[in-house]
Image (cartoon, rainbow, N blue to C red):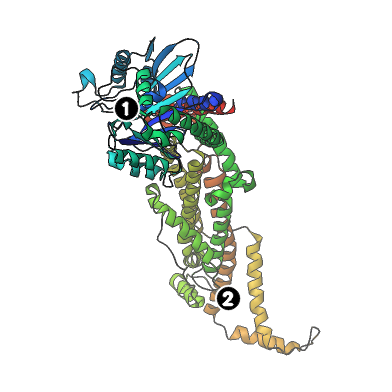
Amino acid sequence: MENSLVTLPSSQPPDGTSYANLDSLGNHIYLEKQDKLRDLGIDIQTSQIIVVGGQSSGKSSLLESLTGFSLPRGQGCCTRFATQITLRRHPVKKTVISIIPRANADQKLRDTLRAFRHELTDFRPEDVASVIEKANVVMEIRSGNNKDILSLPMFSDDILKIEISSPDCFSVLAVLSCLSDPATEGILQLAKAADPKGERTVGVLTKADLVKEKAVLKSVSDLALRPTLKLGYFVVRNRGADEDDLDISECKRREAELFEDPAWKDLANAGRLGVDALRTELQTLLTGLAKRELPKQKAEVLKRLAECEKRSILYGPPRSTPTAQREHLIKLALRFERLANDALEGLYSRDVLFEKEPPLKLITRIIDLNEGFSNVIWKKGQTWNFEGETPEKDDTASYIELMNDAFDWASTVPELSEYCHPKITAFKSTKGDIMTFIGDCYSASRGPELGSFGGSVLTMAFKAQASYWDEAATRHVKTAILVIHRFLYTLLKTLIKDKRIREELWSCLQDDLLIGYQRACEHAKFVINTELNGRPVTYNHYFNDNLQKARLGRQKSILIGLETSGANTKVELQKVQTLLATAVENKSNAEQVREDIHDMLKSYYKVARKRFVDNICQQAINHFLLDGDQSPVKVFTADWVAKLSDSRLSRIAGEDASTLAARKRLETELEGLRKALEVLRS
């Protein structure tokens, strides 16, 4: 006696299994839903009964007895594809055979497979065999006349659907899969892998007519009556190898005759004997499973439908024409412009993207950079400390961190190589003795002036004092470029999920971006050259104010030696005159000139420093990189898209073959899921 196992699955069945779905008369609605779901081919778990067994263990004969339909059987017989058999009660008797395409079939193949349809008026095995052979040809698998064509696959993932209508039928769905029959001794292990607790497995002991010895018969009865499986075992007599010509009614008669033997009495009383008892049990089990699975199926369909609709939004509408391509890009450009403007205005609350992607907070990062740059020029920009000044506390760490973070990101971006700098850990320290430098500068360039100095001295001194501005400003502008480039890249990556469109668009934009970056760098160089290589010029009244304050400060320092005792202290005029005379008499002409140069340099440096920082930040960065009409932030606009040629437009937004195929698969899946939801809600 051989055995088969019938398992009610909670997951996809293992390879080498057969499927059967059975419905009772009173609960046909539940399983009709399962039939419709399976017909949709959407790869969703449906209520089913899995039949597993070794080759020639009697699976086909067992299913034939359950369904009343002759299935492939015999020595060496192996079904090459899944077969779904649906039996429905209907006043007109007929059989319709068709093919359900596999889930991943392309549209052309799906149309070919769905066009396969044959209608039979009876259930003659030779007619069924002929149709199955034709199905093999349509599915393009090896069999019959083309069995020697090695390029054809042995098996198919398509499903042969056989729908039988008859006034005598109860609703039954059987799905058979014999891709590879497991060895008989492996059946229990196979079932245990799918059902470790044995709560969903029914054992079926076939070929009961071959049991002759009483000891073996008793063992079979003991196993069926005291099963290790929670759902128990059934014993059936299936069609023998020499009984192919017998009709089903004769097979049933022989089974009933066999089980009249008193040796089977205990099993008969327990309701564990014969195909009819097995059918009743399977109907009950399957109906209960179908009821329980409906809520889970609905939840799964809703979840997958939401995921597919989300993916569909990312794909956007079909883009097969220049008009459709332009419309798609314009929509992206308009959204890009809106988010870019919000980023420039700091209106981060208008879109959740700003919280999800910190690099999108553009104006905040630029302001932080500009303030850091101003602080560095203010405290570290001069080569020497002016008289009376002491080095201020170094608080440039946050600025250094911002720059290094930008350099780290840009180091992996090839097009930004010329804008990257090595990491920095600290800025240079200022020197202390500026008067010695001024003296050397005066000595090296003094002219015939009496008690004064020529204009070239101030020019030379200022250029040396502000020499660090060039390096600091150049690095600052390039850092701002890196921050802006990262902003643009992140925004496009966030907005455009289609990788091909994003990469093509980014490639097309890069030339314009690099031109904009170069324009900003050139203007920064212009500002630097104007300040450091031109004549010192200013019409800012603060220059004169600073100069007068510096001179007044020196005069006040002379009077420090006077004794005072309050705000209204009276001092002798003679003492004041003496202090002033001493200060003048003890100072050489060269010393006086050096002091004048120092005070004028200090006054001009303060005015030029403010002007320089403002010009770099306002012109090179704010105008050329952010707000100007040709700024990189404003490269991708609806106007830019409108001016694209059709060929360039197709290169960016056109759909390649893989995208078209993916879109078609998605549309097919969406259609199936929507129909599945209708079935579940009906």
**What percent of the width, then of the height, locates residue 68?**
40, 20
Location of residue 334 (image quadrant):
top right
Q: Quadrant of the N terminus?
A: top left
Q: Quadrant of the C terminus?
A: top right
Mark found first going from the N terminus, 1 or 2: 1
Q: How many marks?
A: 2
Location of residue 174 (image quadrant):
top left
Q: Is residue 549 left or right of residue 377?
A: right
- Residue sitting at the far right: 568
Q: Which of 360 and 656 is in front in this view?
A: 656
The answer to whether 679 is drawn above or below residue 452 in the figure is above
Indicate which disc residue 560 carries.
none
Q: Which of 677 and 413 is in front in this view?
A: 677
Density class for disc 2 (Cα within 10 Å; few <14, some 14-19, many ≥20) is: few
- Of the residues shown, which amino acid type is indicated by label 1? Ser
**What percent of the width, then of the height, locates residue 238?**
33, 27
Q: Nearer the viewer, mark 1 or mark 2?
A: 1
- Residue sitting at the far left: 148
Indicate which disc residue 156 carries.
1
- Of the residues shown, which amino acid type is indicated by label 2? Glu
Kindly tell me whether residue 58 is visible in this rendering.
Answer: yes
Kindly tell me whether residue 42 is visible in this rendering.
Answer: no
Q: Is residue 256 left or right of residue 23?
A: left
**What percent of the width, then of the height, locates residue 142?**
24, 24
Density class for disc 1 (Cα within 10 Å; few <14, some 14-19, many ≥20) is: some
CA gap, disc 1 and disc 2: 88 Å
**What percent of the width, then of the height, locates residue 70?**
34, 20
The residue tagged with tag 2: helix, strand or loop? loop
Indicate which disc residue 389 carries.
2
Q: Which of 382 and 491 is in front in this view?
A: 491
